[in-house]
């Protein structure tokens, strides 16, 4: 069997196309969605992500401002910027690109963002709302995964879902979102005793580990849906996911590629949250 490829790039492009019309309509109503993107330092990967976010905004008509701050920016300076952006009416969403340099406490900065402008969905108030099932800004990567599953017609009700990874930005929130769709969810991590035991009984596997090609085809059930969140740069410069695509795609019913799977959806969900924030604040 050869798996159906879940084409995140195409799905993201079709969602962004609809956003162009949505933003144009909002502008007619006098609402211009605005996003502030803040980057501190020169991390090359962060620069790439920030560039993609700005490009995404321009593509759908969202106003964006970039704050490109030097590596030695103090925590106080960054907190002052958050306070200023919280009050700025042109700005509906604030995104601070992580990681931050070590002199800055990431939590302090993220918690200083007004929860109504927290388009990354990392503020404890918004995470709390996710836990109790209230409307909120969903964190972008797991939200993107849920949209991919929905677009691919995958019904999660009663399915065994195994999430590998328990980070605050992917593993934990995706587990809650799968649960909210009535999947039976197991969360695995580095201390899990027999990972294959869990993945082999899963109808849906979400791999968010950060270890290249760790999940092999023989760790999967025949016909599973496999979502590969991993983005790992190999020594030869190529990108690899957390799933060994070649063996996994022979076993799976459907699978996301890396690149071109989850990645394009993350920024698309950031744009979606910014539009949502603009509507809420209008
Ligand atoms: P993270 O914070 O480093 O978390 C990794 C998780 O994997 C941890 O919970 C860890 O367990 C678990 N883990 C490590 N080794 C394991 C093993 N041998 N068996 C089972 N679990 C193991 O990473 P993250 O931020 O969630 O990101 C995960 C991957 O997704 C990375 O490759 C990242 O680049 C990628 N990512 C992609 C996007 C996108 O838009 N495409 C967005 C975010 C992240 P412990 O908790 O026990 O340490």
Image (cartoon, rainbow, N blue to C red):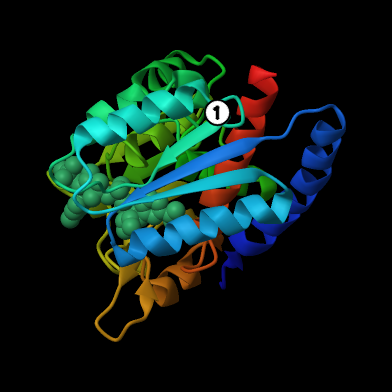
Work out which quarter of the rendered image holds the N terminus and state it: bottom right
Q: Which residue is drawn at 84% across and 44% down?
A: 21
Locate residue 282 relative to residue 29 in the image: left or right.
left
Locate residue 231 relative to residue 99 in the image: left or right.
right
Work out which quarter of the rendered image holds the C terminus and state it: top right
- In the rendered image, is residue 242 in sight? no
Compared to residue 117, the image places residue 141 above or below, namely: below
Could you tell me residue 67's position as x and y percent?
A: 42, 47
Q: Which of 131 and 201 is in front in this view?
A: 131
Q: Residue at x 43, y 64 (%)?
A: 48
Compared to residue 160, the image places residue 89 above or below, namely: above
Q: Nearer the viewer, residue 167 or 153?
A: 167
Q: Which residue is drawn at 43% across and 72% down?
A: 245
Could you tell me residue 207's position as x and y percent?
A: 36, 53
Q: Mark 1 points at which residue?
A: 181
Q: Which of 213 and 218 is in front in this view?
A: 213
Could you tell me residue 13's position as x and y percent?
A: 70, 58
For mark 1, give the secondary structure.
Answer: loop
Locate residue 15 relative to residue 190 in the image: left or right.
right
Compared to residue 47, the image places residue 2 above or below, namely: below
- In the rendered image, is residue 101 in sight? yes
Residue 64, image quadrant: top right
Count the numbered circles shown: 1
Residue 6, image quadrant: bottom right
Locate residue 114 relative to residue 189 in the image: left or right.
right
Residue 184, image quadrant: top left
Query: Circle 1: is it few (<14), some (14-19), or many (20+) Cα within 10 Å?
Result: some
Q: Which residue is drawn at 48% across and 72% down?
A: 250
């Amino acid at each position: 069997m050869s798996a159906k490829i879940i084409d995140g790039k195409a799905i993201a492009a079709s969602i962004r196309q609809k956003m162009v019309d949505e933003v144009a309509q909002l502008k007619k109503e006098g609402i211009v969605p605005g996003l502030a993107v803040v980057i501190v330092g020169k991390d090359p990967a962060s620069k790439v992500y920030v560039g993609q976010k700005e490009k995404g905004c321009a593509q759908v008509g969202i106003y964006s401002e970039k704050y490109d701050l030097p590596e030695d920016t103090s925590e106080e300076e960054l907190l002052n910027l958050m306070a200023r952006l919280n009050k700025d009416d042109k700005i509906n969403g604030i995104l601070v690109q992580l990681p931050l340099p070590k002199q800055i406490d990431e939590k302090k900065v993220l918690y200083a963002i007004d929860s109504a402008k927290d388009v990354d969905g990392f503020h404890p108030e918004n995470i709390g709302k996710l836990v109790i099932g209230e409307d909120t800004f969903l964190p972008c990567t797991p939200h993107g995964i849920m949209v991919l599953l929905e677009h691919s017609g995958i019904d999660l009700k009663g399915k065994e879902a195994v999430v590998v990874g328990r980070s605050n930005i992917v593993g934990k929130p995706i587990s809650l979102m799968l649960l909210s769709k009535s999947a039976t969810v197991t969360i695995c991590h580095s201390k899990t005793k027999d990972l294959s035991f869990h993945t082999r009984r899963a109808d849906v596997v979400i791999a968010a580990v950060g270890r290249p090609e760790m999940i092999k085809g023989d760790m999967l059930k025949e016909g599973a849906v496999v979502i590969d969140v991993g983005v790992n740069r190999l020594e030869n410069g190529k990108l690899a996911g957390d799933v060994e695509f070649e063996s996994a795609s022979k076993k799976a019913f459907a699978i996301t590629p890396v690149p071109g799977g989850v990645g394009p959806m993350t920024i698309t969900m950031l744009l979606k949250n910014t539009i949502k924030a603009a509507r809420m604040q209008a």
